[in-house]
Amino acid sequence: MNMAMRVLVMWMAIVLVLDGVSAQGRKAKNRNKSGGGSSDSSSDSSSSYSSSSDSDSAPAPAPTADDDGYHFISRCFPKEEFMDPPMSRRLAIEQELERHIEEVLRNPRRLQDLPNPLRIPINIHIVKGLNSADIGYEQIISQFRVLNEDFSATNDDYEDAGEADDFSGVAGNYEMQFSLNKIIRVDSTVAVFPDEANGVELSDMKFTAKGGSDIVDGTNIMNFWAADLSAQYLGFATFPGWNPDKDGVVVYSEAFGSKAYDHNNAWTILPGYNLGRTATHEVGHWLFLEHIWGDGNCEVDDGVEDTPVSAADNVGCPADNGGITQCGTKDMFNNFMDYVDDDCMNMFSAGQVARSQAIFLTDFANGGRNEFLAYVDNAVSEAFVDYFYFIYDDDECDAGHTKLPENLNLDSDGDEIYLCISYTTNPYVDVITDLVIVTGTSPTCPDTEYELIDSNLNEGNTLTPTYICYRKESQTTATKRIVDLTAFVVLGEAFPTDFILLTPAVNVATNPIYLATKTVTGSAAAAEPHHIEPQIERETPTEFEGNTKPETEVFALSLGQNTLLNVWLMLIAVICTCFTWMFCVQRSGKMKMESYDKVSPI
């Protein structure tokens, strides 16, 4: 291709790009979604991001006379409290991420490349303040169970997604599972975060030197802090691409976990926010979701096509009043990204799911979370036990977990108790390497490397209270790994010789019940990887109406022979570009740049 032709091709490409930009501007000004006007956050990100992020600045309305007062609470801290990096850099990161998301969603079939389910391991940091109650293992597991239900559309109230103006048709399913990697416990000298009088900043809970707990392997594992937060806020989270030393989710310790799994009614959780949905909301932000109302009025959008425009957040449960209508349409108040009570939210939209999934197909360097897929290519050949928990009566294990058939509380008048086991082939996840059975009313594990599972396996009978402690280690340093865990009702029959019985029995009445483990030693060989390309790629040429679209030649302009002619041709291209830009501006109407913190639409 000669130089003149190359310059002509470049000029035509610029014309098409600028025309596309002007079309986006027209879309942002003219789009009327579900009866309400809004601006597209992908094309007007200076407005979208100016007041919305994964922490929330909208104050909750004052409670009415018959209110119990807890609606003074807002789910998220204002973003200005924890913004990092600075606003200008953050805007650039988020605009770049938006561009990559749009590129993925132009070919939505690429989302099928994601693992199903997509497994996200979590490090839980329990930062126990000076005046706060401890959070036990069962309460931690309750939070995991809520996340697994809400992000796989298996929550019991998912079928109620149509309550608000029949939104069931747009309800989405992330097909995502969360697993417990580490529990990191810190007895902090700090009472609350933040505490301006004592020089304590909001994000200090993420740093050991400041009374919190340092992030651990934030590239491949989500980090989640439960801590005492001041004021009336319940949590906050970082968007993709922010400061990697602070990346993750934070939830107020009294909004952590679900009372639905509080078997002994012993946990202190705030009314209205006691079903674990604050974590669901904040993980949504971590997955790059805005608030459902876009943190603005009817002219500001959340960047998702299938969520109706709304003017503000909702609190309480609008379903009790027949729903809320704003901006000409009913609000999707039951969306997890609104501010309603936990028992009133039940769904993400399909558009929100697609937006979030796209960040896992975007490079980490561009603000994406593609490194969370590294486990797919590096899977180990044998599955190991990464965590387990106990359920009661007719409850069922989370999807993908194995339920042992033996009732571990066989000779009791109390509830039946069953064991649920999670296995992993993810080499980045810690695995269980040892189990110890402890007894007594004040059970103690062998040392601080062990975690106590606070489920009494002799509950409801007169036998000695019995508990289990476990130890987890990194797969790169562990000398043995537990590959299976089972239970035996020992009545003299033999059990497989490759299992080791744990003593004492968990139930020593008429039918003693023993837990047993199967272990392997040494390092595990890597399995053949399942190939996946998380990086963004340009779409390959496709056929249009029987004609094959020709591949575009990749070229670079260089000043070689006929230098003077080349210079003139480039100058002509610049002049043509200027005229083209003026033409596009004329077509799209007035276009002006708005400051990052201004939210009024054009």
Image: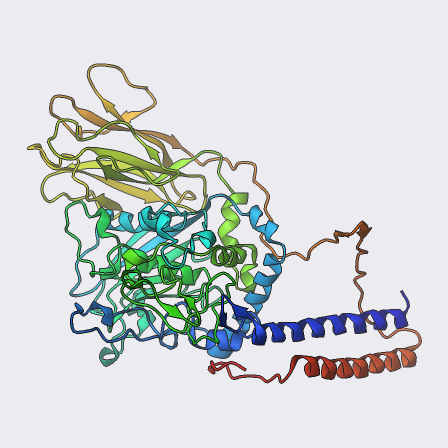
Residue 539 to residue 530: above or below: below
Residue 58 to residue 121: above or below: below
- Observer-nearest of 428 and 172: 172
Task: Identify the image quadrant of residue 398.
Answer: top left
| Left or right: 307, with 575 as reference point | left
| Left or right: 65, with 538 as reference point | left
Task: Identify the image quadrant of residue 234.
Answer: bottom left
Residue 383: x and y, percent? Answer: 43, 35
| Residue 215 shows up from this direction | no
| Left or right: 190, with 173 as reference point | left
| Left or right: 444, with 582 as reference point | left
Residue 410: x and y, percent? Answer: 17, 27
Quarter of the image with the C terminus is: bottom right
Q: Give the colouring mode of the picture.
A: rainbow
| Residue 422 shows up from this direction | yes
- The residue positioned farthest toward the right in the image shown: 562
- The residue positioned farthest toward the top in the image shown: 493
Residue 110: x and y, percent? Answer: 60, 50
Quarter of the image with the N terminus is: bottom right
